[in-house]
Image (cartoon, rainbow, N blue to C red):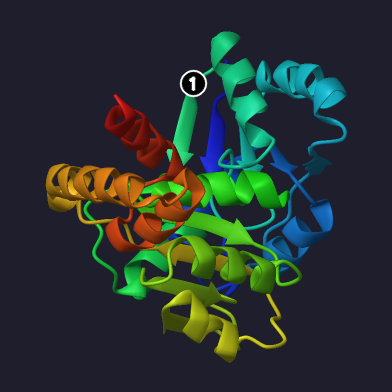
């Protein structure tokens, strides 16, 4: 029974390959690649020759049985376009199928855009939450950011340059004081890491280009209970003074970093 190696490849700089990854790619009988053209460039750079088979979101259903059949005869390596496979990536189905068929699945770790961005952001991070690409619809994005307001974890996400300014504007509205890092073109020639507020990032990135990883600092976990107590008291006072629920929630969401859902629950409690 062959093994399936899950091999991390560079996210930009082709020198970011471990010795082990190079050895594995040279030894296996089959390399399963998200894009065979990208994989071919990498193999040629390191003077490796091997059989490539495309495996992506569009052909995975018919490719999985073919790859499992090959795994009976030989070891195979799974690579994505960049970074570590099977994370926000169609490779996850192949990994699951190989393990279910009794094959050993072996990690060959290396480059990861998520970890790279966290390491250079310089933001307080004891835990983090990775959400892949951010929601495309305005409503879903707003809900995710409002939820983040009350969470202590750092949020890490991918974003396209075409949507970056829209996303930064949404962050400015939901988390105006929260620090974030815009990590652009990591490990590439024009790598850039900008740290500041969303408003500052909007002023900096007037014409965004390149691949982007966003890192948004988490809230202060230790302030959670006291913030809710203070917010509940202010909501009750605002209600007494005649402010509407929407007005009160808009004022306090920014001040206390609480989600609108939690503020709504506190408003209902004040009504009782």
Examine the rendering and report whether any part of residue 116 can be seen: no
Residue 124, percent across and down? 24, 65
SS of the residue under disc 1? loop
Q: Residues within 10 Å of mark 1 (few under 14, many from 20)?
A: some
Residue at 58%, 20% in the rendered image = 96
Residue at 21%, 56% in the rendered image = 220
Q: In the shown orientation, is residue 43 left or right of residue 22?
A: right
| Vertical comparison of 178 with 72: above or below | below
User: 163 and 262: which one is in front?
Assistant: 262
Residue at 42%, 78% in the rendered image = 197
| Vertical comparison of 10 with 269: above or below | below
Residue at 38%, 52% in the rendered image = 149
User: 211 and 24: which one is in front?
Assistant: 211
Q: In the shown orientation, is residue 40 left or right of residue 123?
A: right
Question: Which residue bears the numbered disc 1?
Answer: 104
Residue 227, percent across and down? 19, 50
């Amino acid at each position: 029974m062959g093994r399936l190696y899950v091999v991390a490849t560079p996210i930009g700089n082709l020198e970011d390959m471990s010795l082990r990854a190079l050895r594995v790619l040279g030894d296996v009988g089959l390399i399963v690649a998200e894009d065979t053209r990208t994989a071919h460039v990498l193999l040629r750079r390191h003077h490796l020759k091997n059989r490539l088979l495309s495996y992506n979101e569009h052909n995975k259903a018919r490719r999985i049985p073919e790859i499992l059949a090959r795994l009976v005869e030989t070891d195979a390596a799974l690579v994505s376009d960049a970074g570590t496979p099977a994370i926000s990536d169609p490779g996850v189905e192949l990994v699951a199928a190989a393990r279910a068929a009794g094959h050993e699945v072996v990690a060959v770790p290396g480059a990861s855009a998520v970890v790279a961005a966290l390491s250079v952001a310089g933001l307080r991070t004891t835990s983090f939450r990775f959400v892949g690409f951010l929601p495309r619809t305005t409503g879903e994005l707003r809900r995710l950011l409002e939820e983040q307001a009350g969470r202590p974890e750092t949020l890490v996400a991918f974003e396209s340059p075409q949507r970056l300014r829209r996303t930064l504007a949404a962050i400015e509205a939901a988390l105006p004081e929260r620090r974030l890092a815009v990590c652009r073109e990591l490990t590439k020639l024009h790598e850039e890491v900008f740290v500041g507020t969303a408003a500052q990032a909007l002023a900096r990135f007037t014409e965004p280009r390149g691949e982007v990883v966003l890192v948004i600092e988490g809230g202060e976990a230790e302030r959670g209970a006291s913030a809710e107590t203070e917010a509940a008291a202010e909501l009750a006072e605002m209600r007494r003074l005649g402010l509407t629920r929407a007005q009160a929630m808009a004022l306090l969401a920014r001040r206390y970093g609480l989600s609108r859902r939690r503020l709504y629950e506190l408003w209902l409690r004040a009504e009782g």
